[in-house]
């Protein structure tokens, strides 16, 4: 597609349930990032994938969060046993060659609400 | 710790007036600096970036920013605001050469443009 595609755009879940958020990056972009945007914390880096290298998971807030990227393209962010503080907009971004130019292309985000 | 501070969470200007959005960073090493814009219900879009070339950087939609090392600032300006400039603006920094996609964002400034 022309841009970064994320699904679902909105997700409402109950506390304790698991959720999966999907990101389809721009074709040809080797780097993929997940960020979280919340009222109290602003925009936070979560995880970064570059090609076949081990991902940089330094931003994941707890072990309930995990992400994978299959075939160097689509990525899934999984949150297990969701908590109310996980409510946020989860943004995916992609870029060429690890973002050396600093230009990330963001999707519209997946808004997660945990009741 | 490295951080980014945007002064003023909300800025209101009249159409045609000067826009000034402030950004300061803390770092002991030269950073890469960016301004992103987020229109309602859209993903973030890169406005401009500083990567150690010219200190005055011109971006899209008539915006520009000046890197001032002595003041650790990277303020965003536009001479004449348009109604279409109403959005949320994020200043961001990266301190990692080769992976400038791992960004630290400011809290954001919402720009309101009054007719």
Image: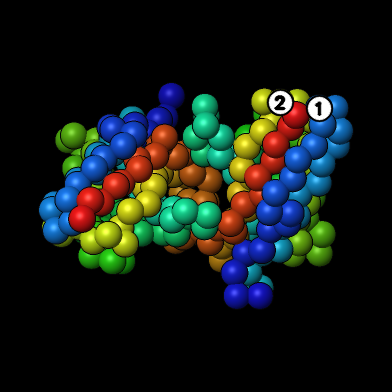
Residue occupied by mark 1: A15
- Name the foreground residue: A57 vs B35: B35
Q: CA distance from mark 2 to mark 1?
A: 6 Å
Asked if residue A74 shows in the view, the reply is yes
Query: Mark 1 — on which chain does it sit?
Result: A
Query: Mark 2 — on which chain does it sit?
Result: A
Q: Residue at x 63, y 37 (%)?
A: A88
- Name the foreground residue: A65 vs B56: A65
Residue occupied by mark 2: A84
Asked if A3 appears above or below B54 in the picture, the reply is: below
Q: Residue at x 24, y 43 (%)?
A: B12
Asked if residue A64 shows in the view, the reply is no
- Name the foreground residue: A6 vs A58: A6
Q: Residue at x 76, y 49 (%)?
A: A21
Circle 1 packing at 10 Å, graded few (<14), some (14-19), many (20+), is some
Circle 2 packing at 10 Å, graded few (<14), some (14-19), many (20+), is some
Asked if B46 appears above or below A39 in the picture, the reply is: below
Q: Position of residue B4 (x, y in %)?
A: 37, 34
Give the structural element (helix, strand or loop) at label 2: helix
Whether discs 2 and 1 lie on one chain: the answer is yes
Q: Quadrant of residue A50?
A: bottom right
Q: Quadrant of residue A52?
A: bottom right
Give the structural element (helix, strand or loop) at label 1: loop
Asked if A53 appears above or below A15 in the picture, the reply is: below
- Looking at the picture, the colour scheme in use is rainbow
In the picture, measured across the screen, residue B115 lies left or right of residue B107, that is left
- As drawn, the label of residue A24 is none
Earlier along the polypeptide chain: callout 2 or callout 1? 1
Q: What is the quadrant of the N terminus of chain B in the image?
A: top left
Cβ–Cβ below 8 Å for labels 2 and 1?
Answer: yes
Q: Residue at x 28, y 32 (%)?
A: B7
Q: Position of residue A64 (x, y in %)?
A: 80, 30
């Amino acid at each position: 597609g022309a841009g970064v595609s994320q699904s679902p755009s909105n997700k409402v879940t109950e506390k304790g349930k698991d959720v999966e958020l999907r990101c389809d990056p721009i074709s040809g972009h080797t780097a993929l990032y997940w960020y979280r945007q919340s009222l109290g914390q602003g925009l936070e880096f979560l995880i970064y994938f570059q090609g076949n290298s081990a991902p940089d998971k330094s931003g994941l807030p707890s072990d309930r969060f995990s992400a994978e990227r299959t075939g160097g393209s689509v990525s899934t962010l999984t949150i297990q046993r969701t908590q109310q503080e996980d409510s946020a907009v989860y943004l995916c971004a992609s870029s060429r060659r690890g973002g050396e130019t600093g230009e990330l292309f963001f999707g519209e985000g997946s808004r997660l609400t945990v009741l | 710790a490295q951080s980014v501070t945007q002064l003023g969470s909300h800025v209101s200007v009249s159409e045609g007036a000067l826009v000034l959005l402030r950004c300061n960073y803390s770092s002991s090493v030269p950073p890469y600096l960016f301004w992103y814009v987020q229109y309602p219900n859209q993903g973030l879009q890169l406005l401009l970036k500083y990567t150690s070339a010219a200190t005055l950087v011109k971006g899209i939609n008539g915006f520009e920013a000046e890197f001032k090392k002595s003041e650790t600032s990277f303020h965003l300006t536009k001479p004449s605001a348009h109604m279409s400039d109403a959005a949320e603006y994020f200043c961001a920094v990266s301190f990692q050469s080769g992976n400038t996609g791992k960004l630290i964002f400011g809290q954001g400034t919402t720009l309101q443009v009054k007719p």
